Image (tube, rainbow, N blue to C red):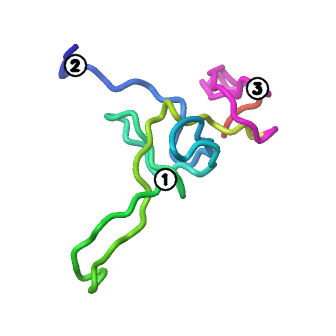
Amino acid sequence: MEKKKHEQPAKLKIRKGDLVKVIAGDSKGSQGKILEVILEKGRAIVEGVNMVSKHTKPNAASPNGGIVKMEAAIHTSNLMLVDPKSGKPTRVGRKKNEAGKLVRVSKRSGEEIK
């Protein structure tokens, strides 16, 4: 199935700054804050999760080069948002608040996700 040019990437339920838990893969069970979301690929970079060793050439920032440990992108289907109230993973819903604005809501506790 080929993607058309005008087609937009899928809407994600997680955002930069959210606290998420990894539910599948090598880093399963670990928790971290989202540093970056790559919408086109449906992936996210999570702090301290999915660490890889990258070989770097010497440059102005690191004159010696060498091996650097860094976070690799992880697919968003392997991530679950952490409920702000209970601290457990939760699904995400959307509701209108008092002001009539659409906000994300935790399915576990019903609390609004900031």
Up-down relation of residue 36 to residue 41 (above or below): below
Q: In this view, does 85 lie to the left or right of 95?
A: right
Whole-percent x and y of residue 51? 46, 57
Reading the image, the residue beneath label 3 is: 108
Q: Earlier in the sequence, mark 1 or mark 3?
A: 1
- Residue 104 is one of the magenta-drawn residues: yes
Reading the image, the residue beneath label 1 is: 35
Up-down relation of residue 101 to residue 51 (above or below): above
Badge 2 local density, few (<14 within 10 Å), some, or many (20+)?
few
Residue numbers of the magenta segment: 85-110
Reading the image, the residue beneath label 2 is: 3
Quadrant location of the N terminus?
A: top left
Q: Which of marks 2 and 3 is nearer the N terminus?
A: 2
Q: How far apart are marks 2 and 1 (CA)?
A: 27 Å
For the residues bearing labels 2 and 3, Cβ distance under 8 angstroms: no
Whole-percent x and y of residue 107? 72, 23
Up-down relation of residue 7 to residue 24 (above or below): above
Amino acid type of the residue that numbered disc 3 sits on in the rendered structure: Arg
Residue furthest to the front: 26
Whole-percent x and y of residue 31? 63, 49
SS class, disc 2: loop
Q: In this view, does 33 lie to the left or right of 61?
A: right
Up-down relation of residue 112 to residue 28 (above or below): above
Badge 1 local density, few (<14 within 10 Å), some, or many (20+)?
some
